[in-house]
Image: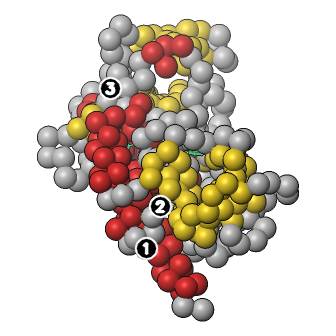
Amino acid sequence: MAYEAAERVHCLIIGSGPAGYTAAIYASRANLKPVLYQGIQPGGQLTITTEVENYPGYPTGIQGPDMMIDFEKQAIRMGADIRFGLATKVDFSKRPYRVEIDEEKWIEAESVIICTGASAKWLGLESEQRLNGFGVSACAVCDGFFFKGKEVAIVGAGDTACEEALYLSKLCSTVHMFVRRGEMRASKVMQDRVLKASNIVVYWNTEPLEVIGGQKVEAVRVHNKQKDKEEIIPISAFFVAIGHQPNSDIFKGWIDMDEQGYIKTISGTAKTNLEGVFAAGDVQDKNYRQAVTAAGSGCMAALDAERYLSALESI
Ligand SMILES: Cc1cc2nc3c(=O)[nH]c(=O)nc-3n(C[C@H](O)[C@H](O)[C@H](O)COP(=O)(O)OP(=O)(O)OC[C@H]3O[C@@H](n4cnc5c(N)ncnc54)[C@H](O)[C@@H]3O)c2cc1C
């Protein structure tokens, strides 16, 4: 691959969500002089939410964007070099590894920490986007608590949708679950649990057409394909559980991933199959997808990078 390397760094961090900034804090304090590229969403997914109540250390909760400004400030105070820019290509064929930024310049890095996150898939309804953060959510564990004792809806038919429906059923009075087809993709055991739950109502062959509400979610309008009938169901929240897309395209072919594109890490570490390349946060975690777990794995990645670089220096 022809390129002109502009700069060489010890530790390059790609992504500025909880994983990236935490990695930057730890890497700075270990004197790795990390350079972090923020990508097109500085602060990551939490910048598109409102209240975060489950991140330890904020006893009265905090707005997601404010929390990520705190993360950034802390990383800067520790000495991290935070830059606006997007990693557009990588060449991991040999060390130092090379990462192209904004299709313009190449950076050489002794170690790379990938924290590019994952993006929730949405139905694509205008009303869904307008009410996002005001009752529309892609994360039951994050936002279910705000709707304790209320009627809510969820759309999806996979294992995650079933898991989230069951989670909500323990908090909410009724969970209306919309399944596009006459069957679910979820495993039999998950389907059985959903169908047995007394307060989950499954609507087969049913698609949401519109989330109704001015300032917050008030109802959902759905269409039953089999009966060709529309119905309006009053709800307080609308959860979308149709999957996530890990932001890992540029690393395809260079490091091991599962069939959905989640980066594989060696259990109990942030190491990928390539020495010196680490991954943290949602890009390698389809199970938990929480800010605190992303931050925890960012810490692991920085410590793994520090140990890797120390071992290299001692050779
Ligand atoms: C609406 C919403 C509400 C949520 N609420 C909560 C909550 O209350 N509590 C909770 O614990 N969790 C919550 N979550 C989940 C939480 O936001 C994620 O688990 C967490 O942000 C994952 O952190 P991350 O660092 O892995 O990645 P992300 O936050 O996804 O950040 C990814 C970063 O990578 C950058 N990036 C991507 N590609 C590139 C590239 N090519 N080059 C450079 N940078 C790149 C992006 O710009 C971004 O900065 C919520 C999520 C959503 C969507």
Q: Secondary structure at mark 1?
A: helix
19 relative position to 267: left or right: left
Q: Say which residue label 2 marks.
A: 34
- Residue 160 position in % (x across, y down): 52, 46
Along the viewing direction, whichever of 98 and 5 lies nearer the viewer = 5
Task: Quadrant for the C terminus, please.
Answer: bottom right
Q: CA distance from mark 1 to mark 2?
A: 12 Å
Rendered position, 193 above or below 135: below
Question: Can the viewer see residue 77?
Answer: yes
**N-terminal-most mark, 1 or 3:** 3
Q: Is residue 145 visible?
A: no
Amino acid at circle 1: Leu
Using the image as rendered, state which of residue 7 and residue 213 is in the foreground.
7
Image point (42%, 10%), residue name: 212
Q: Which residue is mark 1?
A: 303
Side (left or right) of 260 relative to 214 = right
Amino acid type indicated by mark 2:
Pro
Residue at point 45%, 48% (across, down):
82
Where residue 197 sits, quadrant-wise, is top left
Q: Position of residue 137 (x, y in %)?
A: 42, 31
**Separation of disc 3 and disc 2 at Cα?**
47 Å
| In contact (CB < 8 Å): disc 3 and disc 2 | no
Label 1 to label 3: alpha-carbon separation: 44 Å
